[in-house]
Image (cartoon, rainbow, N blue to C red):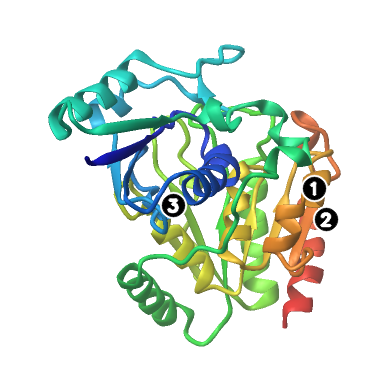
């Protein structure tokens, strides 16, 4: 009898998927199910890297489903205060896959995010939620890495390269965790001219969050704009960028967790109060007790963070960068 373990469908935020759902699911598969099970995951395109070491098949939502999904909200989805853990359209997607790919004689097990408590907002404040989770450093697909490495080596011309992900909500207005886009541009110019490095501004394009998109037309020597379309290797591409540059700078976004799993140096500007997250046991283990990790966490969300000074950001990053030399 064939045994299937069907995981998901994941509809939540990328950060929760990265640091909660995928590690918890990895532990569940390795400790609950036998090796004779065929493991399938349903989720967003481009994120197969998170599951490649323990999932047999990754099934991505097609574009027609992506176009109808509400914004992700922690481990679920919904606008503002809405928090839905299941959506009819993704449930139907899984049901159709089962009908087309299995038979009545198959033994089928479902593993959903709420079963592993990978969906609650207090994941960001409670250490004990991660007792049954398996964290490890991740490597991008070797072919993707070779291509990215080649591009970066040619671009660098022997200089250090700094990767920057600057969150920018598509509404182009003050978001509670955004920094002023003009300040980002000023910071980038300072980094290039005063530290004599090159900069790659990268981010994934989507309907809800075009990270770094306002910089893709920034006309300045020493910068490479690297917008990443949603595709099967989108996350591999981001990890390859992180692992082939000197260090990275992140705005206040949960995507900064990528650097912990990539095991790369990171300087991040985050909302005041988020530094305690660094005390999580899994963060300490992945970063060798915060080696080469610096969070600038001084300003409250909203206009306080949005208007925070460029010179301070630059000076703090410069100190961080000099320690890496």
Residue furthest to the front: 1
Kindly give the residue lying farthest to the bottom in the view shown: 158
Distance (Cα) linking label 2 and label 1: 6 Å
Would you say 122 lies left or right of 49 here?
A: right
At 70% across and 37% down in the image, what residue appears? 129
Q: Which residue is mark 1?
A: 309
Label 3: few (<14), some (14–19) or many (≥20) C-alpha neighbours in 10 Å: some
**In what quadrant of the picture does the C terminus appear?**
bottom right
Q: Quadrant of the N terminus?
A: top left
Residue 289 on image: x %, y %: 79, 65
Q: Which is nearer the N-term, disc 3 or disc 1? A: 3
Q: Nearer the viewer, residue 212 or 137?
A: 137
Helix, strand or loop under label 3? loop
User: For numbered disc 1, what is the local secondary structure?
Assistant: loop
Q: Quadrant of residue 54?
A: bottom left
User: Would you name the residue on which mark 3 appears?
Assistant: 216
Using the numbered discs, state the Cα–Cα distance from disc 3 to disc 2 in whole angstroms: 24 Å
Task: Say whether marks 2 and 1 touch (CB < 8 Å).
Answer: yes
Q: Which disc, if any, is residue 312? A: 2
Question: Is 6 located above or below residue 104 in the figure?
Answer: below
Q: Is residue 31 above or below residue 44?
A: below
Is there any visible trace of residue 10 in the rendered image?
A: yes
Q: Nearer the viewer, residue 89 or 226?
A: 89
Q: Secondary structure at mark 2?
A: helix
- CB contact under 8 Å: marks 3 and 1: no
Q: Looking at the image, which is closer to me, 65 or 271?
A: 65
Query: Are the residues tagged 3 and 2 within 8 Å (C-beta)?
Result: no
Report whether 287 appears left or right of 36: right
Is residue 307 among the parts visible in the rendering?
A: no
Q: Earlier in the sequence, mark 3 or mark 2?
A: 3
Which residue is at 56% across, 83% downward?
Answer: 159
Q: Is residue 43 above or below residue 22?
A: above
């Amino acid at each position: 009898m064939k045994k299937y373990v069907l995981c998901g469908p994941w509809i939540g935020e990328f950060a929760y998927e990265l640091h909660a759902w995928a590690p918890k699911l990895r532990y569940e598969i390795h400790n609950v199910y036998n090796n004779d099970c065929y493991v399938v995951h349903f989720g967003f395109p481009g994120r197969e890297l998170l599951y490649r070491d323990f999932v047999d098949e990754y099934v991505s939502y097609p574009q027609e489903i992506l176009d109808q999904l509400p914004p992700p909200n922690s481990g679920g989805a919904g606008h503002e205060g809405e928090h839905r853990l299941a959506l009819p359209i993704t449930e139907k997607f899984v049901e159709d896959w089962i009908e087309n790919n299995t038979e009545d004689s198959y033994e089928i097990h479902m593993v959903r995010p709420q079963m592993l408590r990978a969906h609650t907002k207090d994941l960001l404040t409670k250490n004990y939620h991660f007792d049954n989770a398996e964290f490890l450093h991740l490597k991008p697909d070797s072919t993707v890495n070779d291509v990215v490495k080649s591009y970066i080596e040619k671009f660098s011309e022997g200089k250090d390269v700094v990767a920057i992900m600057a969150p920018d909500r598509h509404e182009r207005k003050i978001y509670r965790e955004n920094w002023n886009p003009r300040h980002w541009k000023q910071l980038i110019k300072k980094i290039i001219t005063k530290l004599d490095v090159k900069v790659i501004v990268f981010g994934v394009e989507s309907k809800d969050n075009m990270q770094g998109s306002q910089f893709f037309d920034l006309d300045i020597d020493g910068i490479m704009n690297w917008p990443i379309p949603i595709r099967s290797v989108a996350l591999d591409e981001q990890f390859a960028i992180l692992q082939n540059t000197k260090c990275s700078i992140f705005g206040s976004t949960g995507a900064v967790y990528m650097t912990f799993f990539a095991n790369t140096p990171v300087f991040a500007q985050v909302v005041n109060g988020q530094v305690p997250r660094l005390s999580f046991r899994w963060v300490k283990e992945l970063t060798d007790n915060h080696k080469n990790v610096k969070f600038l966490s001084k300003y409250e969300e909203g206009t306080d963070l949005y208007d925070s000074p460029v010179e301070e950001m630059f000076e703090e990053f410069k100190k961080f960068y000099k320690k890496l030399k």
